[in-house]
Amino acid sequence: MVWDRRRSIRTPLRANGALELLDGRQPPLAFGITITDVSSGGVGLISGAPLPVGVQARISLKEGVLYGSIAHCEAQDGRYAAGLVVLHDPGILLRLMYLAQLSHPHPRPDPAFARS
């Protein structure tokens, strides 16, 4: 049995943006990323370079900016799958969750099986 540590439901989303590591370097290291999923606690993403776990980061998207901490990063098919736990969110995470719901709506019950 595989234990899933996630506490929130993830919804698929595809959004491109830029991630900057806030580790004290000037200028900050920046990477192009793709958000792959979103939940109430953070985002999953794909990066072309490894991201150091525990480091604070800023993600800039056309919807706005997220601040968080890199929770995990694993090599995957020549790229890196990572997760960002969101620490500061001025409403952007809710907008991303809304966009994800629009692009991947939950299936609705078939009216033929509806109970009276």
Image (cartoon, rainbow, N blue to C red):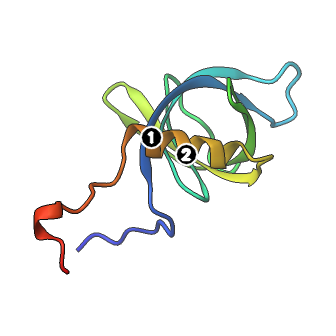
- Whether pointer 2 and pointer 1 mark residues with C-beta atoms closer than 8 Å, the reply is yes
* Residue found at the far front of this picture: 116
Q: Is there any visible trace of residue 56 in the rendered image?
A: no
What residue is disc 2 on? Answer: 98
Q: How many marks?
A: 2
The residue closer to the viewer here, 33 or 63, is 63
Q: Is there any visible trace of residue 48 in the rendered image?
A: yes
Q: Quadrant of residue 20?
A: top right
Inspect the image, locate mark 2, and give the three-letter code of the amino acid beneath it. Tyr
* Residue found at the far bottom of this picture: 116
Tell me the residue at 45%/46% (across/down).
101
Tell me the residue at 68%/23% (across/down).
62
Give the answer, above or below, for where 42 lies relative to 50. Answer: below
On the rendered structure, is 3 left or right of 41? left
What residue is disc 1 on? Answer: 102
Q: Quadrant of residue 63?
A: top right
Picture quarter with the N terminus: bottom left
From the top left corner, tell me how far across and down residue 74 is, in percent.
44, 42
Picture quarter with the C terminus: bottom left
On the rendered structure, is 82 left or right of 79? right
